[in-house]
Image (spheres, coloured by chain):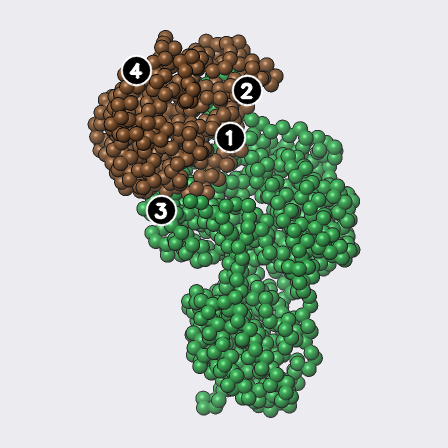
Amino acid sequence: MSSVAQILKTMEYGPAPESDSAAQAWLDKHGRSFGLFINGEWTKGGGKPFDSISPSSGKKLATLAEATPADVDAAVKAARAAQGTWAKKGGQGRARYLYALARLVQKHARLFAVLETLDNGKAIRETRDIDVPLVARHFYHHAGWAQLLDTEFPDHVPVGVAGQVIPWNFPLLMLAWKIAPALAAGNTVVLKPAEDTSLTALLFAEICQEAKLPKGVVNIVTGAGETGRAIVEHDGIDKIAFTGSTDVGRAIRLATAGTGKKLTLELGGKSPFVVFEDADLDAAVEGAVDAIWFNQGQVCCAGSRLLVQESVSDRFIAKLKARMENLRVGDPLDKVTDIGAIVSPAQRQQIADKVAQGVADGAVLHQPQSYSNGAACPEGCFYPPTLLTNVEPASVLAQEEIFGPVMVAMTFRTPAEAIALSNNTCYGLAASVWSEDINVALDLAPKIKAGVVWVNCTNQFDASAGFGGYRESGFGREGGREGMFEYLKPKAPKAAPAAAVAASAVEPQLSESDAIDRTAKLFVGGKQARPDGGYSRAILSPSGELVGQVGEGNRKDIRIAVEAAQKAESWSATTGHARAQILYYCAENLSARSGEFAARLRAMTGASKAAAAKEVDASIRRLFTYAAWADKYDGAVHNPPLRGVVLAMNEPMGVIGIAAPDEAPLLAFTSLWAPAVAMGNRVVVVPSERHALAATDFYQVLETSDMPAGVINIVTGGREELSKTLSEHRGVEAMWYFGPNGKTVEAAAADDLKRTWIGEPRDWLDGSSEGREFLRRATQVKNVWIPYGA
Amino acid sequence: MSNVQHLNPREISSGSADPADGRNPITAFDADVIESVRVNRSAAERRTATLPGRRTVKKQWQAAWLVRAIQCIDLTTLAGDDTPGRVRRLCAKARHPVRQETLEAMGIGDIGLTTGAVCVYHAMVETAVDALRGTNIPVAAVSTGFPAGLSPLNLRLKEIEASVAAGAMEIDIVIDRSHALTGNWRAVYDEMKAFREACGPAHVKAIIGAGDLGTLTNVGKAAMVCMMAGADFIKTSTGKEATNATLPNSLVMTRVIRQWHEMTGQKVGFKPAGGIATAKDAMNYEFIMKEELGDEWLQPHLFRLGASSLLTDIERQLDHFVTGRYSSNHRHPMA
């Protein structure tokens, strides 16, 4: 034992262990064996029990039950039975329970923190100061949303039963992110914690009992992948919320394709950490510590790609290496530990393998030479803080998620190059930008493709600000107003009147294209273009007479159209005011030719004169609506507890593929592209297959309305085939599909985790067929955190 | 922090100091280095807000860290009602900051524990020197028109000379904050350089008056310019500003010291002062020193805590460590 005199020589910190006796006593109280929490009761579970191991000690903590499909079914039935009553409690009724849960989390805060540290291996400093306070905050915040639900989300209803599958890196926090908004919105849940880290979820189940939460509102089922699969595939679940790896997310997208289940996915990342030469470099070094050595780097939004301006690169790396020497790796229950245990030996091995592979590929490895506690990285499930230099964007290490305390460093020269490198990834979860120049920082924030951008900070979270990804980092948001929408749905839109779906009895015929007839071409890149295949499609009247012909687009036409849409990128940066002007101009030019459009509708659909005129008029009004919205769909300023602002910016998706329905061929077509384009997207539209002339006639309206080339591209032809090609296209960010084969679209979109909207038939004339729901679909929320201080 | 690195040791001018004495010498004024100081306030506050949660010391480690804090205290009295009697009492406390029985219980009865220095006004220097005779405890004098630093420059220089002549081994000068607030870093430099030269062999601590400077960036710049002009220590505050030592301004100053060390190889000391009243406060400053600058900066030659009531709180904690009972102020000899 060191004496005071000895310590005065070394000035070491010494051990500062947090006692785990209360957590051990809690485990003992349960006989170190846990069941499933279904319908407010503990049941045994039909599967093979499995061990919960503490990664830091390798010791078994408890035996957990494995939920079988039958157990999951029981949980779903309990959730279903409880949901109606739970929803009927109303926002205020539910707010009281959420508030009670928040209070109980605080009441048991230290037990939660210690149990989490035992189970997961993360440092007690983090569970105590970060995870658990954020959990309590999440329940408080969502107690508020429950209270305000009726006034703030009118015309919305709960989705129903939510199946929630969460990861092992923030076990309790991810539970809170899933359960709090679901319950606030009036849903009931079946939640599966990760098999490595289930204990705090089971403790949470106990506080649900303590809060007298009605039975069946929260069900916790433990188990591994098979249990998760049973949830994902269960017919009685209305929504799946998943946080975890991109591969599993993709599998879930495939499994749920066509089932009508609402889906949110929060997946992997390779987030850039961008340091400019004018940054406070010491602050950025500390930011890097919080970015990649927080939670052992097992953070989906970890700033794992260091991009540092070449002019300060050597100095920054030197500072970072010096800082690494002070990080303390070891017993996660020690209050002076910075980096605890990796969650499992398997995970540790994966990290080691990836680093070894990177080093074999030429990366230069930097790990601390010594640790401030005098000891090397301990044996066991620990991995030292690691920095890899001599890594290029082409290196595997720069592209693949490592999910460990490993940062790879690259350099950039200019802001433009920083943006390009930041976006040179399939992911888009988060980014961190360090610069003392407000112009540089605020210019980059919107240009980096990521759901969260932290300016001069990193890994900041709060219940009031949405969190979620772009691209293959998944879709949907957790937290804030935007997160509430993930657990709500609009009250059923007014159904389509039967007469509006004027299906032709006669199948359209393909015919050889005639060089001199009036066959409509495709509209691509602002020009009318012949279809690649050289075929055309006959458009018939209800009685089978030829009304006209349109080009038969194919795969290649889609490719060319998407290229044109991608090239029209400047539209996304155009001001809302300018976009409004063009939409107004479209409305004006459509109005000038309304008679002609009405006649065409009548010829194709057999609609009455009045009905056709009404559809044209509604289309003009819809253009006015979205011209009006173009400069008004504002973001928000969130108010998390910090000195600063969080800007929730509504950003366009990018390129949206749209397959329009046959009903209301002009109005539905207009109702879909107009909100997308108003929000700054570029679109490739496959118009009504049967009544495509309504869209091809529109070419001239577009041409005379100064619509920039490539903003709207129209490819006529077979909707199903073209939709599949669009859904598969990796350059298309979102796919809106109104037709019968939603499953094909959703399955095709799984590859790059494209956002999809499978639309139901609806009354396009009704006011519910325009407005915020459409604008929300056309945008994704980016939260930009800007702490400030003179 | 500073993003420009112009200086290297070869450029260092001779200044007045003997290069062999290991002191930070006077170097040439370099506006670029000063202007390149960058401090992000929110990030600095985040670092200091989380540091006490990241680092802690318990049991004998805590006792040792508190003993070290005592060794670094500039035990201070800077009041209008100071008298020779009061100063002698302070000096006695500096010689015996903790009851001997407590030290012996900790096994350090023989280390000759004293505070780092005694800090007084010029008028009390001779009394203090006299009272501390036979010890290695230096007397520090606050000087140069303390605390505002606005008396005529020639008088400020005379004051230094008088304090050094009276036996002060350390001189705590104050910069003229008006120069800092108007961005006249050259003037700050020139005055600081003159102070350093006037100090001769006495070590000079530059008080930047952090609480008067408005921004952490100014804190960083002022600290940088003082080091450039030969300060041996940089010090946060006089104790008389509306805000004195804080963890954020200390973080900024320690980082500038680190930067200076990287640039020149010179080691400049740091002294937070004002408002440091509890053992917990003192340990937080020690954590900053260890984390940002390293173990060497936990020694009295590079770290001082300007404080008066702090010592009693530390004594109470040490008493508790030894006896297991919470202590009371009246058990500890007053300063």
Taking depth in this image into account, of A718 and A533 the one nearest to the observer is A718
Amino acid type at circle 3 is: Asp
Callout 1 and callout 3 share a chain: no
Q: Hue of chain A?
A: green
Q: Numbered disc 3: what chain?
A: A
Asked if residue A227 shows in the view, the reply is no
Q: Which element type, helix, strand or loop, lies under badge 4?
A: loop
Amino acid type at circle 1 is: Arg
Crowdedness of circle 3 by 10 Å Cα count: few (<14), some, many (20+)?
some
Amino acid type at circle 2 is: Gln
Circle 2 or circle 1, nearest the eye:
2
Q: CA distance from mark 2 to mark 4?
A: 36 Å
Callout 4 and callout 1 share a chain: yes
Circle 2 or circle 3, nearest the eye:
2
Residue for badge 3 = A278
In percent of width and height, residue A119 lies at 63, 37
Name which residue lies at 60% across and 18% down. B326
Name which residue lies at 26% across and 23% down. B158
Taking depth in this image into account, of A769 and A242 the one nearest to the observer is A769
Name which residue lies at 58% across and 31% down. A333
Q: CA distance from mark 2 to mark 1?
A: 18 Å
Residue for badge 1 = B55
Q: Are marks 2 and 1 in contact (CB under 8 Å)?
A: no
- Which of the two discs, 4 and 1, labels the residue nearer the N terminus? 1
Q: Numbered disc 2: what chain?
A: B
Q: Numbered disc 1: what chain?
A: B
Q: Hue of chain B?
A: brown
Q: Are marks 1 and 3 in contact (CB under 8 Å)?
A: no
In percent of width and height, residue B103 lies at 50, 12
Residue for badge 2 = B317
